[in-house]
Image (spheres, rainbow, N blue to C red):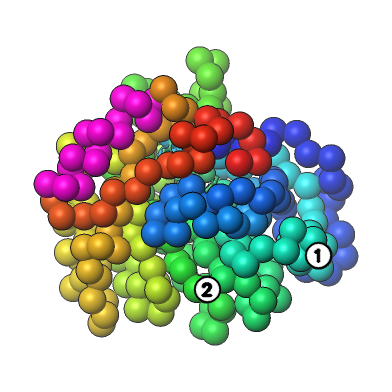
Amino acid sequence: MPVTSEVDRPETAPDGPALPVNELFASLQGEGVLAGVPSTFVRTSGCNLRCWFCDSYHTSWEPTHAWMAVDDVVAAVAERDPDHVVLTGGEPTIHEESFELLRRLGDDYHLTVETNGTVVPPEGTPVDLASISPKLASSTPTAERPPAGADGEAPPADSGEWAARHEANRIDIDALATLVERYESQLKFVVTGREDMAEIVDLVERVREAASVAVPDEEVLLMPEGQTRDQLADTRTAVAELAAEYGFRYTPRIHVDLWNDAPET
Ligand SMILES: C[S@@+](CC[C@H](N)C(=O)[O-])C[C@H]1O[C@@H](n2cnc3c(N)ncnc32)[C@H](O)[C@@H]1O
Ligand SMILES: Nc1nc2[nH]cc(C(=O)O)c2c(=O)[nH]1
Ligand code: SF4
Ligand SMILES: [Mg+2]
């Protein structure tokens, strides 16, 4: 989603453990093996990568947030009384305080963490589903594929530097292997076309070789790239057909089908 660009909470961190929060809302999980399950989402701001297609532009390329004490995040979640909580971003694992939040929530909710798979939480951090979305070469920003959230305006001045950092850091096989070993997980690839398939097959193979647990095909998901209904209309059938052809699982983006690119959905 092109997430919230304006927030009305404090711009400086309060005392004690706190997180930069872009948005906090109740919706349906739109992606993956739990698609359709009512969930409360906590979206942190800030990311260690820069996908050109990032649908959360205001957590990565142009981060906006307000600081919330971890206590207040816990209270805001409790107010919505969910069974499932999804911690996402941005990249939630770049914040130490995300792990404190997960520890605080762990006894009371099913916890999904949406992550690019480059950071492993400290041992003992409660995570019920690691929803890992490793980033493919086709995610790297280029002159032909500038940041999608720029809406036709000039891309951010630092996008060239970020292209190199993104390319250097997007895959860490040891981190991916540790995540799948430690947690129930799904590998959820954003697919832009058939050109992505060789890299996906190779990456899954490398994770399988590095991990001490099996990674069944049904935990490898292909998700069509697209931030809007119109964009998904162009990609979803081809990606579903690739899933059928390769024996991987297809996941829709049902929040986009339902609410297009509205914030807090
Ligand atoms: C915004 S990311 C936040 C979590 C983490 N940084 C990550 O990338 O997994 C949430 C999910 O949206 C996916 N995503 C982002 N932009 C997308 C797009 N244009 N089309 C399809 N999926 C997208 C990501 O791959 C990830 O699975
Ligand atoms: N409804 C809904 N489901 C989602 N699943 C993962 C999301 C994310 O941005 O991480 C997301 C999101 O932004 N909205
Ligand atoms: S890793 Fe996730 S949050 Fe970061 S730029 Fe890519 S899609 Fe956006
Ligand atoms: Mg999203």
- Residue 75 numbered mark, or none: 1
Mark 2 Cβ inside 8 Å of ligand 1: no
User: Which residue shows up at 37% across the image and 43% down it?
Assistant: 252
Q: Closer to the camera, 45 or 261? A: 261
Quarter of the figure that contains the C terminus: top right
Quarter of the figure that contains the N terminus: top right
> Is 126 on the left or on the right of 120, as rendered?
right
Helix, strand or loop for disc 2: loop
Question: Which mark is first along the chain, 2 or 1?
Answer: 1
Q: CA distance from mark 1 to mark 2?
A: 19 Å
In the rendered view, would you say 3 is above or below 68?
A: above
Q: Is residue 25 magenta?
A: no
Q: Tag 1: Cα neighbours inside 10 Å, few (<14), some, or many (≥20)?
A: few
User: Which residue shows up at 37% across the image and 30% down it?
Assistant: 232
In the rendered view, would you say 150 is above or below 56?
A: above
Magenta stretch? Answer: 231-245
Percent position (x, y) of residue 26? 66, 51
Q: Closer to the camera, 56 or 231? A: 231
Percent position (x, y) of residue 66? 78, 47
Helix, strand or loop for disc 1: helix
Read off the residue under disc 2.
127
Magenta stretch, main secondary structure, is: helix
Q: Closer to the camera, 247 or 164? A: 247
Q: Closer to the camera, 31 or 113? A: 31
